[in-house]
Amino acid sequence: MSIGPLPEQVNYRKIAQEAGKLEGFIKLDQCERLAGSIIETSGEVQVKLSFRKARKHRFLVVGKADVVVKLECQNCLTPLDFNLQVDVRYFIVNDADVEIPEGEDSLVCEGEMIRPVDIIEDELILGLPMVARHSDGDCLESHIHINENSPVEGATHRPFAALAELKDKFKRS
Ligand SMILES: [Zn+2]
């Protein structure tokens, strides 16, 4: 199967008529809101979506998105790879007032065209960890925050404090 870039917009009603699928990638830098939360935007999000008609003139899109993003470890402040995999499931409705089944989410889309990035981006953002950290033992030790245990210092983010102390030591010796 050929996996190329997804079109910027697709006619979801037409795809749904044929119970069709969409598979391809979206460049990370096209996910503008997600790109603001990660430290490198050169990757691609692999996306699989399938569309079908639901009852009462509604449409259902189900699928998944998968990407490795670079985040900054809050422990050692160096980059870490985070495997972000999310499932999406939305009823596409043309009006926010349209009723959807309980427990389901909806996407409001007034026309026939929808941007695939709008289908996956919210879930991707929700899938990011609250605090990014390397798993145990993977942190770059020389960068670990020396003052982590002190209550005052611990609350403040001072990436260069440790470096300054080191420089002092060198000057003195
Ligand atoms: Zn780390």
Image: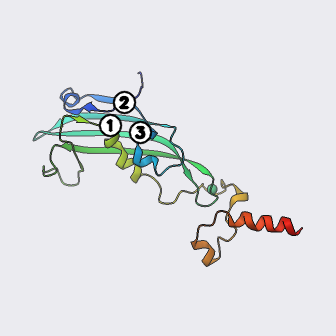
Please, what is the three-letter code of the amino acid marked with disc 3? Answer: Gln
Instruction: Provide residue 18's location: percent of width, then percent of height.
Output: 20, 26
Q: Is residue 158 left or right of residue 171?
A: left
**Labels 2 and 3: the sequence-earlier one:** 2
Q: Mark 1 — residue?
A: 116
Indicate which label's residue lies in the foreground, 2 or 3: 3
Q: Secondary structure at mark 3?
A: helix
User: Toward the viewer: 133 or 54?
Assistant: 133
Q: Are marks 1 and 2 in contact (CB under 8 Å)?
A: yes
Q: Tell me the residue that label 3 is attached to.
A: 30
Q: CA gap, disc 2 to disc 3? A: 11 Å
Which residue is depicted at the point 40% across and 40% down? 65
- For label 1, the SS is helix
Specify whether 155 is left or right of 48.
Answer: right
Q: Residue furthest top?
A: 1
Split into 4 quadrants, where in the image is the N terminus? top left
| Residue 75 in which image quadrant | bottom right
Going from the N terminus, do you reach mark 3 or mark 1 first?
3
Q: Image point 40% across, 48% down: which residue?
A: 33
Which residue is pictured at 36% across the width and 49% down the height? Answer: 123
Q: Is residue 68 above or below residue 157?
A: above
- Single out the residue that lies furthest toward the left: 56
Where residue 147 sits: x, y (%)?
67, 71
Q: Which residue is mark 2?
A: 6
Amino acid beneath label 1: Pro
| Distance from the alpha carbon under mark 3 to that under mark 1 | 11 Å
- Disc 2 residue type (three-letter): Leu
Distance Cα–Cα, label 1 vs label 2: 8 Å
